């Protein structure tokens, strides 16, 4: 019965002795021990979580629902999608791979939008209303208006609508160029037709190229905000309630939210709005080059100190770049003073410049940096050249040559030249490639070599001369055409 009490008494005795033992330490030792036991308090970098209640109450009435309708076309019975299922898939207004945007298949496409002025101008996505016969806007108070499509641009994925209404609640554009990863952002829209759904998250990245969207002129804002079908065209807002982007795309294997969402920067969208109001179309700057990224091997081959920039693979005759003196295999490092880190940075920068404007281009060529002046042209209305399929089973004729690079080239006969779309006097065919070279470079039999470095190749003799002096370990740049597209490939000769 008394053992617990004796234990308590013993603990008390020990507690009384401990201060005496501690007092016998030297002051320095005591200080060191105190630091080891009690580290300094870490100051919090982030405090609290935001409450978006007031923001949503203030801006919510300016967010609208968009309904785009088109009469169904006559069915041919040859479609791969079962009847009725196509309408179900596109009902909620966000594009899917290999399917037309908007309500082109008939039925109704649902999306979102937002009012940008008190006299009834509304912004949404191009793909929400593309091909529609009738567009209906439903306000937060349930009033419905038939909308006029003022203009629409597929590349920016922006559409400007107008309804006949006054004294509307509208949203103020924010400065999307000042966005930084980690900032809080809010989306309001109608996912799956659920009007005025609010989701929040952070900016994941800015200036993002989305290779799955086919929109080379848009430096997307990437977020982890939950975006689903029907959110398309809705606003992405900062914590001040300003619109910094238009929710446009999602990356998904399932068709639903997976934590990677893309929005069109608001400064880009407002540039499009002004042009659509004035002319009904959007014009973008263009300099007339095809470009690719710079690999470390390519940088080494041309003497570039790093892999920043956009390497020019083709210059369109008579274009702004051609007139300015830009050449194939030049690396564009800056445009109007803005550095080009990755080749995908260049199209949005050039596209945002008004056609006819003067611009300065910094180019790396032959170990030197050049400053060139050019007058920016207008984007071609014809678009890019249609791609041709690569030749999987070429049947060339003529002499062949095996080189130290492990490549065998053959002449192009007239029929094959025409089939591959190679101009007369250009190119030789790769008929055989050493397995190690194919694995390292991605080259394939049937590729056409158009140039070695800056020198054009029109025959096997040209090919031989261009590679005759290649030393073991040396890296050579080959300009290769495949499927109607050209690209420089760095190939390193095997060491002895």
Image: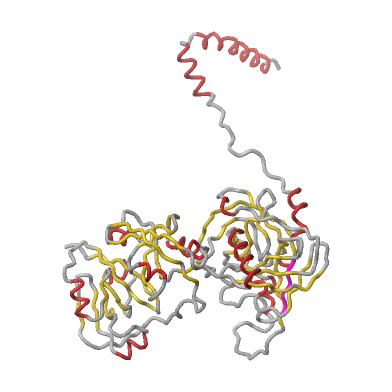
Quarter placement of the N terminus: top right
Q: Is the magenta stretch mostly helix, strand or loop?
A: strand
Image side of residue 258 versus residue 452, left or right: right
The percent position of residue 317, horizontal first and vertical second, equals 38, 76
Nearest to the observer: residue 218 or residue 226: 218
Name the residue located 45 percent from the left edge and 14 percent from the top edge. 28
Residue 90 located within the stretch drawn in magenta:
no
The percent position of residue 292, horizontal first and vertical second, equals 39, 66
Q: Visible in this render: residue 262?
A: no
Name the residue located 67 percent from the left edge and 59 percent from the top edge. 235
Rendering quarter of residue 150: bottom right
Quarter placement of the C terminus: bottom left
Rendering quarter of residue 168: bottom right
Nearest to the observer: residue 475 or residue 269: 269
Q: In this view, does 383 lie above or below 366?
A: below
Residue 68 located within the stretch drawn in magenta:
yes
Q: In this view, does 13 lie above or below 336?
A: above
Name the residue located 30 percent from the left edge and 76 percent from the top edge. 450
The colour scheme applied to this rendered structure is secondary structure
Image side of residue 294 versus residue 228, left or right: left
The percent position of residue 45, horizontal first and vertical second, equals 58, 37
The percent position of residue 131, horizontal first and vertical second, equals 66, 79
How many badges with numbers are in the image? 0
Q: Visible in this render: residue 240?
A: yes
Q: For the magenta stretch, what is the residue range?
A: 65-69
Image side of residue 263 versus residue 420, left or right: right
Image side of residue 16 versus residue 169, left or right: left
């Amino acid at each position: 019965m008394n053992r617990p009490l004796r234990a308590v008494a013993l603990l008390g005795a020990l507690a009384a002795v401990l201060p005496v033992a501690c007092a016998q330490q030297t002051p320095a030792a005591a200080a060191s021990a105190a630091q080891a036991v009690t580290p300094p308090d870490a100051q919090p970098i982030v405090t609290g979580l935001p409450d978006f209640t007031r923001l949503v109450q203030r801006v919510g009435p300016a967010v609208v629902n968009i309904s785009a309708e088109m009469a169904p076309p006559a069915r041919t019975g040859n479609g791969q999608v079962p009847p009725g299922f196509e309408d179900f898939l596109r009902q909620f207004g966000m594009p899917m791979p290999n399917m037309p945007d908007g309500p082109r298949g008939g039925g109704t496409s649902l999306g979102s939008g937002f009012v940008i002025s008190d006299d009834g101008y509304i912004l949404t996505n191009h793909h929400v209303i593309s091909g529609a016969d009738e567009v209906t806007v439903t306000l937060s108070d349930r009033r419905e208006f038939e909308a006029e499509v003022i203009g629409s641009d597929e590349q920016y994925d922006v559409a400007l609508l107008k309804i006949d209404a006054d004294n509307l609640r509208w949203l103020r554009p924010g400065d999307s160029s000042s966005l930084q990863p980690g900032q809080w952002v809010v989306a309001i829209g109608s996912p799956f037709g659920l009007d005025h759904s609010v989701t929040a998250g952070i900016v994941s990245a800015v200036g993002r190229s989305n290779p799955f969207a086919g929109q080379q002129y848009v430096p997307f804002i990437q977020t982890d905000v939950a975006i689903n079908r029907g959110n398309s065209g809705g606003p992405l807002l900062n914590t001040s309630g300003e619109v910094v982007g238009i929710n446009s795309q999602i990356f998904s294997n399932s068709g639903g939210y997976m934590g990677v969402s893309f929005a069109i920067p608001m400064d880009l969208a407002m540039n499009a709005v002004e042009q659509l109001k004035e002319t009904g179309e959007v014009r973008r700057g263009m300099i007339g080059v095809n470009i690719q990224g710079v690999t470390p091997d390519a940088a080494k081959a041309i003497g570039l100190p790093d892999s920043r920039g956009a390497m020019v693979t083709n210059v369109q005759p008579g274009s702004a770049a051609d007139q300015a003196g830009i050449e194939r295999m030049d690396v564009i490092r800056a445009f109007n003073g803005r550095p080009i880190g990755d080749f995908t940075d260049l199209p949005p920068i050039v596209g945002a410049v008004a056609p006819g404007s003067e611009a300065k281009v910094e180019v790396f060529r032959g170990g030197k940096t050049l400053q060139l002046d050019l007058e920016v042209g207008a984007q071609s209305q014809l678009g890019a050249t249609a791609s041709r399929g690569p030749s999987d089973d070429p049947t060339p004729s003529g002499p062949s040559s095996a080189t130290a690079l492990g490549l065998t080239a053959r002449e192009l006969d007239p029929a094959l030249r025409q089939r591959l779309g190679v101009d007369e006097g250009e190119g030789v065919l790769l008929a055989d490639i050493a397995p190690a070279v194919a694995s390292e470079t991605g080259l394939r039999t049937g590729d056409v070599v158009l140039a070695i470095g800056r020198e054009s190749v029109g025959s096997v003799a040209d090919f031989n001369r261009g590679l005759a002096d290649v030393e073991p370990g040396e890296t050579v740049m080959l300009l290769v055409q495949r499927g109607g597209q050209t690209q420089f490939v760095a190939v390193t000769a095997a060491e002895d």
